[in-house]
Image (spheres, helix red, strand yellow):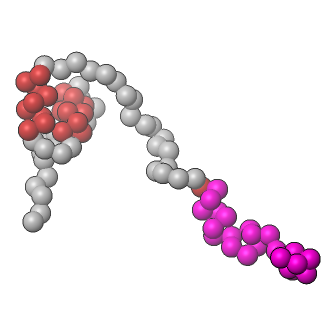
Amino acid sequence: MTEADFARARPMKDVMPQIVEAMKRGRGRPKLETPKARVPRRLDSEVVAAYKATGEGWQSRINDTLAHAIGIKKTKPRARAEKRA
């Protein structure tokens, strides 16, 4: 590049503001306001096997069942969604 090229150059934020804004945002999912807590739990192997047998999302179904059991979730625990062909 020549001196003239550098003299004509403009800041990236003026030329491509969307890209600069996207770079500032960072990567990945947005942070949750109330993230779930990571809690190691020891469950009977039969319980885990039964939930795993229901397929994908078994951890979320355990969470739903526990929340329903202590009364913080009014809806019935969700069943496994059927996969569409």
**Residue 79 spot, x, y in % from top left:** 12, 45
Q: Give, as a single range, the part of the protein colored magenta.
A: 1-24
Q: Position of residue 38 (x, y in %)?
A: 37, 28
Residue 76: x, y in percent?
15, 40
Q: Is residue 2 magenta?
A: yes
Give the residue at the far front of this rendering.
1
Q: Report the quarter where the N terminus lies.
A: bottom right
Q: Is residue 70 magenta?
A: no
Q: Quadrant of the C terminus?
A: bottom left
Q: Quadrant of residue 25?
A: bottom right
Is residue 74 at least partly visible in the picture? no
| In-front residue for pair 34/19 | 19
Residue at (48, 51) in percent of width and height: 28
Which residue occupies the foreground of this view, 29 or 35? 29
**Residue 66 appears in the rendering:** yes
Q: Residue at x 10, y 26 (%)?
A: 47
Of helix, strand and loop, which mostly describes the magenta segment? helix
Q: Residue shown at 18%/27% (left/top)?
A: 69
Residue 12, relative to residue 24: is it above or below? below
User: Is residue 78 rendered to the left or right of residue 15?
Assistant: left
Instruction: Say above or below: 69 vs 19.
Output: above
Number of marks in the rendered image? 0
Residue 51 vs residue 33: left or right? Answer: left
- Residue 7: name its quadrant: bottom right
Percent across and percent down for residue 19 are 63, 68
Left/right placement of residue 55 relative to residue 11 reads left
